[in-house]
Amino acid sequence: MGLRDAFLREMMSIRIEIAAKTNSQLGEGAFWDVHQKCLWWVDIVSGLIHKYCPNNEENETYDFNEPSRLPCSAKNGGLVLAAKSGFWLFDPETGLRTAILDPEEHMPENRFNDGATDMQGRFWAGTMKDGSASEQVGAFYRLDPDLSVTKWRDGFFTTNGMAFFLQMVAKCIAQIVMLRFEKYGRMTMMLRQARQRMKDCFSTRKT
């Protein structure tokens, strides 16, 4: 049996079940809360935040009331969110929303799309034009534990897939390669810029 056949056999043995039927329009941003032992994720379009606890198989839903993304646990409880209107602290139990900063208040057509927390507890999140990935107007921001916000880089189409490594703080961005069909069906791929972005990411080191 070849490696490919072994891989396919293993994949076919995986059993997939519905844990929580939420009918989400765009469910993303899942993360495991080690303290509460539950899974958080959001429905970006509806602004709903979900929490599923496998111990009792219960799913709770909280309405943030605007397109939101990237829930992560705050140090003193509650959640940190990157939403349509910037960074927020949110207490799901009371519904209390505390604004931190909207770094793109001057760009009302943008929204946050993806991000991650690094080993230092800093929350990195990126923006894009809402409903469109065809414009190079996205940027990445870093939210520090003291709630200060710093822009890292801009000029992205779709900010997605940030990850961090233990041995080096290299920000790796899965910059979606844009495919554009021109007249007569000719397709061009914006690979040069994506390649340079990845090169820049891997060249970043912690000092």
Image (cartoon, rainbow, N blue to C red):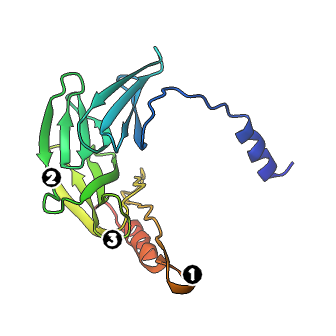
* SS assignment at label 1: helix
Q: Residue furthest right?
A: 1
First in sequence: mark 3 or mark 2?
A: 2
Q: Position of residue 124 (x, y in %)?
A: 29, 52
Sequence-earlier tag: 1 or 2: 2
Q: On the image, numbered disc 3 is attached to which residue?
A: 135
Q: How far apart are labels 1 and 2 at the CA level?
A: 40 Å
| Residue 197 % position (x, y) | 39, 72
Q: Is residue 72 left or right of residue 17?
A: left
Between 16 and 31, the residue placed more toward the observer is: 16
Disc 2 packing (10 Å; few <14; some 14–19; many ≥20): some
- The residue at 74%/46% (across/down) is 7
Name the amino acid, label 2.
Answer: Asp
Above or below, 31 against 165 in this view is: above
Q: Earlier in the sequence, mark 1 or mark 3?
A: 3
State how far apart marks 1 and 3 are (Cα).
21 Å
Q: Which mark is residue 103?
A: none
> Which numbered marker is on residue 185?
1
Estimate how packed mark 1 is, as few (under 14), some (14 to 19) or many (20 or more) residues with alpha carbons within 10 Å. few
SS class, disc 2 = loop
Disc nearest the viewer among 1 and 3: 1
